[in-house]
Image: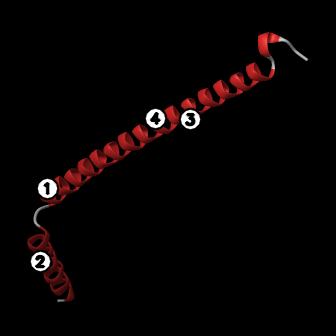
């Protein structure tokens, strides 16, 4: 008799679970859709971070170029006509 009650309880729990959450196919579709949205979000975030890093890289190169130009100008002013002394 306990086997019948166990089966009935399992059957009822399955029925309630399926009616509450829909079919497993719907759950899989929702999960895949969530995954695709997450991937798109990560791609967008990676693109934005790449753009930011490119900007930082360009600013750093410009800064180095400006420092080299200032140093060359200082050296030229300290040693006119290439004379060392």
N-terminal-most mark, 4 or 3: 4
Q: Which residue is mark 2?
A: 16
Q: Which residue is mark 1?
A: 25
Residue 41 higher or lower than 6, as above or below: above
Q: Secondary structure at mark 4?
A: helix
CA gap between label 3 and label 1 equals: 52 Å
Q: Secondary structure at mark 1?
A: helix
Q: Which residue is mark 4?
A: 54
N-terminal-most mark, 2 or 1: 2
Foreground pick, 31 / 40? 40
Q: Residue at x 19, y 55 (%)?
A: 28
Mark toward the viewer: 4 or 2: 4
Q: Residue at x 11, y 77 (%)?
A: 16
CA gap between label 4 and label 1 equals: 43 Å
Mark toward the viewer: 4 or 1: 4
How is the model colour-coded?
secondary structure
Residue 4 lies in quadrant? bottom left
CA gap between label 4 and label 2 equals: 54 Å
Determine whether, in the image, residue 47 is placed left or right of residue 63: left
Q: Are marks 2 and 3 in contact (CB under 8 Å)?
A: no
Binning the other alpha carbons within 10 Å of mark 1 as few (below 14), some (14 to 19) or many (20 upward) gives: few
Query: What label sits on residue 60 in the rendered view?
Result: 3
Mark toward the viewer: 4 or 3: 3
Determine whether, in the image, residue 57 is placed left or right of residue 37: right
Residue 2 higher or lower than 31, as above or below: below
On the image, the x and y values in percent for residue 48 come to 37, 43
CA gap between label 4 and label 3 equals: 10 Å
Q: Quadrant of the C terminus?
A: top right
Q: Quadrant of the N terminus?
A: bottom left
Q: Which residue is most to the bottom?
A: 1
Q: Residue at x 50, y 39 (%)?
A: 56
């Amino acid at each position: 008799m306990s086997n019948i009650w166990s089966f009935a309880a399992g059957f009822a729990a399955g029925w309630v679970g399926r009616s509450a959450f829909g079919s497993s196919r719907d759950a899989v579709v929702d999960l895949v859709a969530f995954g695709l949205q997450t991937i798109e979000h990560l791609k967008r975030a990676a693109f934005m971070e790449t753009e930011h890093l490119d900007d930082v890289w360009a600013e750093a190169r410009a800064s180095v170029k400006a420092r080299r130009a200032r140093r060359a100008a200082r050296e030229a002013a300290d040693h006119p006509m290439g004379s060392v002394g």
